[in-house]
Image (tube, rainbow, N blue to C red):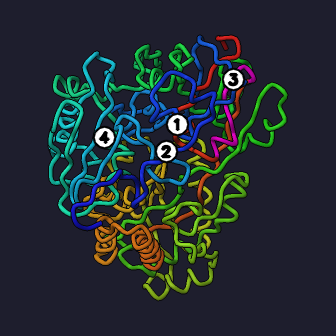
């Protein structure tokens, strides 16, 4: 990208996509920028019905409801409350205009962003250029303690052009910009609420999403109510959206109790514990969906403090883990062995990498070379859920076979966050959920400014590659840089990647509107643009 070029901006040089919708969709009243896209098509047989509260369950409470503060434990509920500027398509590229109606590259370091008109926050304040500028400046202010601030490092300034237009100025060409605003920094937050009490926003969010906070009891439940003024309902030509009157998320730590509630008709949709898939998949009262998702499960090494400063020790731990057995024994086969950070179907994944083999003999040899022939004791943590305890115990037993004693504490998310910040661990639960633009995870985990690094990783060569990838505007060259980043992470054993996730969800038959084929094809944008409903307007 050189000279004074102007074009619509997407991810990695991909323009914001416009598809061709069916005549039935085109005939609806609404915004053509929505209706003319391929993902916007609805099945002509669908007859959505308004009414009823959708009842869900989660093992843990959502945590903070400002997406820029940690911990956040329920990103789906976060998305019900907050819309993003841009949404990611089925190829993991941020090509779908959402609250941002268009992004135009004005010159190599400037993007002009046009916002949608007529959008309001849940507190009645207007979503406009000044509100968004305030939010971005708030995230970048160190006093705000926003873990997402590191992703905005290439940003020089954001300026209001008019009520619905912003000029984003970069320190250098920034091809990942659309991908960043399609993630946490791009969740629209009420500037009015942030100004009045930014700390209160953690428990009293005011977004523009399909649902707004009705009631919350930390540790017990989260209750959301329908937003009658959701902008997307009008834009899509379906004014009854969202169709549920509200959503109630109960906190139920025990997976057996969650399933019992589903079968008793007290829940409508449940993400199953993987041990339950074989039992439930043929239940005549349920519809069960299984699909891969873009999460990576991993172990996090503290590479700058303690024994894991030695790459041989990191390699030994990785070799001591039988990934195939872990997936079979703890995940009941629902997972894909991971070779590195990015999932196998992501354009940033290096296809030349193979999963680290299970080789306990080599692990013992490396430990001996590093001075630990007589064994080694390490400290760490894992999430204190039923599944977390199962995974931690299995890994602990594998490490014991090569002479490594892992003193693993099962902790709540707040306690984990404190341990991360203090680097008070050797080996802990790692990974990344919702891998979209590749810079998000790369910077977040391995760059000194990343929101989840806290000084635990400082490989200068990898940092240089991350910064180069931020600047590379040619898509193929940028892809190669992320392949190089994965290879460098892999060779240095910066983490021990275990598996890419698969998820199983069970719906009661009263739930309508789920389209597995289109969900698999369009992923995130289909989920947010096609709300579900009850067959008769009630559970």
Residues at marks 1 and 4 touching, judged by CB atoms closer than 8 Å:
no
Please indicate whether residue 431 sits to the left or right of residue 86 in the image.
right
- Compare residues 158 and 385 and report the one nearer the observer: 158
Cβ–Cβ under 8 Å for marks 3 and 4: no
Q: Residue at x 40, y 23 (%)?
A: 231
From the viewer's side, name the closer residue of 372 and 44.
Answer: 44
Name the residue tied to disc 4: 68
Q: Secondary structure at mark 2?
A: loop
Q: Earlier in the sequence, mark 1 or mark 3?
A: 1
Q: Earlier in the sequence, mark 4 or mark 2?
A: 2
Residue 532: which quarter of the image? top right
Q: Which mark is residue 46?
A: 3
Q: CA distance from mark 4 to mark 2?
A: 31 Å
Label 4 residue SS: loop
Which marked residue is nearer to the observer: mark 1 or mark 3?
1
Q: Earlier in the sequence, mark 2 or mark 1?
A: 2
Q: Which residues are magenta?
A: 509-520
**Label ID, residue 18:** 2
């Amino acid at each position: 990208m050189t000279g004074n070029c102007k074009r619509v901006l997407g991810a990695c040089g991909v323009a914001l996509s416009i598809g061709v919708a069916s005549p039935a969709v085109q005939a609806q009243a609404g915004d053509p920028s929505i209706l003319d896209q391929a993902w916007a098509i609805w099945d002509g047989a669908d007859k959505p019905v308004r009414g009823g509260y959708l009842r869900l369950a989660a093992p843990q409470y959502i945590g903070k409801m400002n997406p820029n503060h940690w911990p956040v434990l329920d990103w789906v509920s976060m998305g019900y409350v907050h819309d993003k500027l841009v949404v990611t398509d089925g190829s993991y590229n941020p090509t779908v205009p959402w609250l941002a109606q268009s992004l135009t590259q004005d010159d190599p370091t400037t993007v002009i962003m046009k916002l949608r008109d007529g959008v309001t926050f849940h507190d009645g304040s207007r979503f406009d250029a000044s509100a968004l500028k305030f939010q971005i400046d708030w995230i970048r202010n160190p006093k705000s303690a926003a873990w997402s601030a590191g992703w905005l490092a290439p940003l020089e300034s954001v300026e209001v052009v008019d009520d619905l237009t912003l000029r984003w100025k970069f320190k250098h060409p920034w091809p990942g910009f659309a991908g960043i605003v399609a993630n946490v920094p791009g969740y629209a937050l009420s500037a009015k609420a942030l100004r009045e009490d930014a700390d209160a926003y953690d428990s009293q969010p005011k977004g523009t999403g399909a649902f707004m906070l009705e009631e919350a009891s930390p540790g017990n439940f989260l209750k959301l109510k329908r937003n009658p003024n959701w902008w997307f309902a009008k834009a899509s030509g379906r004014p009854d959206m969202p169709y549920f009157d509200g959503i109630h998320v109960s906190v139920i730590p025990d997976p057996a109790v969650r399933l019992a509630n589903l079968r008793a008709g007290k829940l409508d949709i449940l993400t199953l514990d993987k041990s339950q898939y074989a039992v439930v998949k043929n239940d005549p009262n349920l519809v069960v969906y299984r699909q891969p998702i873009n999460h990576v499960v991993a172990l996090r090494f503290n590479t700058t403090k303690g024994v894991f400063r030695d790459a041989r020790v990191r390699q030994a731990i990785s070799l001591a883990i039988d990934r195939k057995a872990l997936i079979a024994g703890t995940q009941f086969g629902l997972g894909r062995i991971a070779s590195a950070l990015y999932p196998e179907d992501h354009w940033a994944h290096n296809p030349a990498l193979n999963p680290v083999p299970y080789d306990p003999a080599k692990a013992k040899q490396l430990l001996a070379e590093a001075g630990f022939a007589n064994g080694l004791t390490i400290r760490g943590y894992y999430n204190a859920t039923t599944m977390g305890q199962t995974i931690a115990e299995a890994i602990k037993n594998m490490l014991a076979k090569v002479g490594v004693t892992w003193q693993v504490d099962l902790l709540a998310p707040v306690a984990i966050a404190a341990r991360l910040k203090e680097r008070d661990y050797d080996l802990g639960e790692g990974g990344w959920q919702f891998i979209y633009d590749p810079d998000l995870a790369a910077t977040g985990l391995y760059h000194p400014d990343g929101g989840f690094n806290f000084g635990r990783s400082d490989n200068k060569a990898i940092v240089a590659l991350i910064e180069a990838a931020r600047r590379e505007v040619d898509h193929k060259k940028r892809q190669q840089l992320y392949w190089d980043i994965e290879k460098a992470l892999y060779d240095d054993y910066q983490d021990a990647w275990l598996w890419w996730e698969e998820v199983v969800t069970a719906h009661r038959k009263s739930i309508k509107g789920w389209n597995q084929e289109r969900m698999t094809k369009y992923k995130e944008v289909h989920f947010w643009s096609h709300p579900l409903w009850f067959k008769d307007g009630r559970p």
